[in-house]
Image (cartoon, helix red, strand yellow):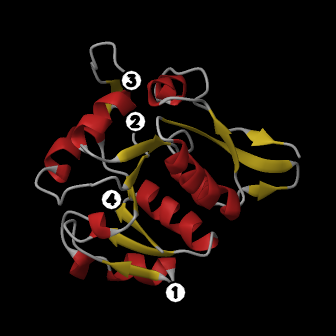
Amino acid sequence: MAVGILGAGNIGQAIATQMLRAGEEVVIANSRGPETLGEVIEKLGPGASAATFAEVPTCDIVAVAIPWDHIPGALEGLPEWNGRIVIDANNAVTQPDFKAADLGGRSSSEVFADFVPGARVVKTANILLASVLAADPVVDSGRRVLFMSGDDAGAKDAVGGLFATAGFRMIDLGPLENGRLHQVPGAPLARSLIATD
């Protein structure tokens, strides 16, 4: 199985690193085209390849790691999601001031789900700095924690299984609306954690 990643910035590369650690292949895309991703693919190493934005949604699992303000435009016109699993690794903050976007009282994941109609959305991998997310999640005192939320149990099992195989301790917070508990900024669970075994 190849895991698709939309967004080749620091977070997208960090997710790619963990999916490779989990033994999966990754297909990564940015807005400028696969020909611009040579250095990224070389850095990620064996199992990584570049694609266009339109090609990535053919993967069974797709992670979206794009600055919040650019998500609507970046996802517009992509192929139908048709039940595919989409990882929401985003935070609803405006750039460059890093202020919380006005979501009208909804969680960022609920808003995000509107951008990927027909997808089974799982929010995770959004609370750690990219350098921490990319690092080996197994540390001396235990395993680094990732929270996840989503409305589809099978999708959460699949996504949680991948990150758990990479070494993370996954904590399921329930339905997608509970993504507000680990959205950045301001959510009570939005911090770097380590779980002892």
* Of the two numbered discs 2 and 3 in the rendering, the one whose residue sits closer to the viewer: 3
The alpha-carbon separation of the residues under discs 4 and 3 comes to: 21 Å
Which residue position holds label 2?
91
Quick check: 132 above or below 185? below
Quick check: 91 above or below 12? above
> Which secondary structure, mark 4?
loop
Q: In the displayed orientation, state which residue is furthest to the left.
A: 77
User: Residue 193, position in %: x, y?
Assistant: 71, 38
User: Residue 163, position in %: x, y?
Assistant: 62, 57
Identify the disc placed on residue 7. Answer: 4
* Amino acid under disc 2: Asn
* Amino acid under disc 1: Pro
Instruction: Evaluate if marks 2 and 3 touch, with contact meaning CB atoms under 8 Å apart.
Output: no
Among the two numbered marks 2 and 4 on one chain, the one whose residue lies closer to the N terminus? 4
Does residue 41 show up?
yes
Q: Residues within 10 Å of mark 1 (few under 14, many from 20)?
A: few
User: Residue 55, position in %: x, y?
Assistant: 23, 71
Among the two numbered marks 2 and 1 on one chain, the one whose residue lies closer to the N terminus? 1
> Which secondary structure, mark 2?
loop
* Amino acid under disc 4: Gly
Which residue position holds label 3?
107
Describe residue 144's horizontal placement relative to residue 96 as left or right: right
Which residue position holds label 1?
46
* Of the two numbered discs 4 and 3 in the rendering, the one whose residue sits closer to the viewer: 3
Q: Residue at x 52, y 43 (%)?
A: 124
The alpha-carbon separation of the residues under discs 1 and 4 comes to: 19 Å
Among the two numbered marks 3 and 1 on one chain, the one whose residue lies closer to the N terminus? 1
Quarter of the figure with residue 134: bottom right
Among the two numbered marks 2 and 3 on one chain, the one whose residue lies closer to the N terminus? 2
Instruction: Evaluate if marks 2 and 4 touch, with contact meaning CB atoms under 8 Å apart.
Output: no
* Amino acid under disc 3: Ser
